[in-house]
Image (cartoon, rainbow, N blue to C red):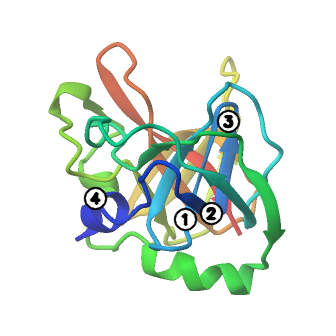
């Protein structure tokens, strides 16, 4: 059910306007909730640039591609290519955002992204499992800077175990939820990363 809700329902038809509740934004794309379907979506920009969007911004953009494009990416099945950069259309508060976030919270009974450990071989991915999820840890997550590492790490408790993942997005100490994403393949493996911390 989780895989269906994050891949099949998202808007993908070329020329369709995608309305997003932004959860994380980076150079070349953003992650958000498709407001029409309620599905988590990776929106890829037509050029590698940073659009200044912050969590809970509302943005819209036209979906690119063509009707003959192949099916979902096996690594990132939620991905959709945009024809143009997204435009900011508004912003909502945490309480209003909860309407879209609550149904997407990862079940406490399931492994994060459906597999144990921090990584999975990319050849095992077939596009039938989500590469994005939102978790609410058992206690507030902590940001950690390890000597010799340029990137922050996030330490959090899930299913009575401590996890520590690299942070590739933004957020602050005290934020209560994590947007977990699967990275692009790196030396044959895709890694769990924290794409953003959400209030």
Q: Disc 1 designates what residue?
A: 33
Residue 60 in the image, given as x and y percentages of width and height: 68, 58
Does 191 sit above or below residue 3? above
Q: Residue at x 73, y 66 (%)?
A: 58
Q: Is residue 167 left or right of residue 40?
A: right
Q: Disc 2 designates what residue?
A: 20
Q: Secondary structure at mark 4?
A: loop
- Tell me, for residue 111, which label it has, or none: 4
Say which label, 1 or 4, has the lower sequence index.
Answer: 1
Q: Work out how far the residue at label 1 is from the one at label 4, CA to CA, in angstroms.
A: 21 Å
Q: Is residue 59 left or right of residue 44?
A: right
Q: Quadrant of the C terminus?
A: bottom right
Report the mark closest to the observer, 4 or 2: 2
Q: Disc 3 designates what residue?
A: 152
Residue 44 in the image, given as x and y percentages of width and height: 56, 38
Mark 4: few, some, or many residues within 10 Å (few <14, many ≥20)?
Answer: few
């Amino acid at each position: 059910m989780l895989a269906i809700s994050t891949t099949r329902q998202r808007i993908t038809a070329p020329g369709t306007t995608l309305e997003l509740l932004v959860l994380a934004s980076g150079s070349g794309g953003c992650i958000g909730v498709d407001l029409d379907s309620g599905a988590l979506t990776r929106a890829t920009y037509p050029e590698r640039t940073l659009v200044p969007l912050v969590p809970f911004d509302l943005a819209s953009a036209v979906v690119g591609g063509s009707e003959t494009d192949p099916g979902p990416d096996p690594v990132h099945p939620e991905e959709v290519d945009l024809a143009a950069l997204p435009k900011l259309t508004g912003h909502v508060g945490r309480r209003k955002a909860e309407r879209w976030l609550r149904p997407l919270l990862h079940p406490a009974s399931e492994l994060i992204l459906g597999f144990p450990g921090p990584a999975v071989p990319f050849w095992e991915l077939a596009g039938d499992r989500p590469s994005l999820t939102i978790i609410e840890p058992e206690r507030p997550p902590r940001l950690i800077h390890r000597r010799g590492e340029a990137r922050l790490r996030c330490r959090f408790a899930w299913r009575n175990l401590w996890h520590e993942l690299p942070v590739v997005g933004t957020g602050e100490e005290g934020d209560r939820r994590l947007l977990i994403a699967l990275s692009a393949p790196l030396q044959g493996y895709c890694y769990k990363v924290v794409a953003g911390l959400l209030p």
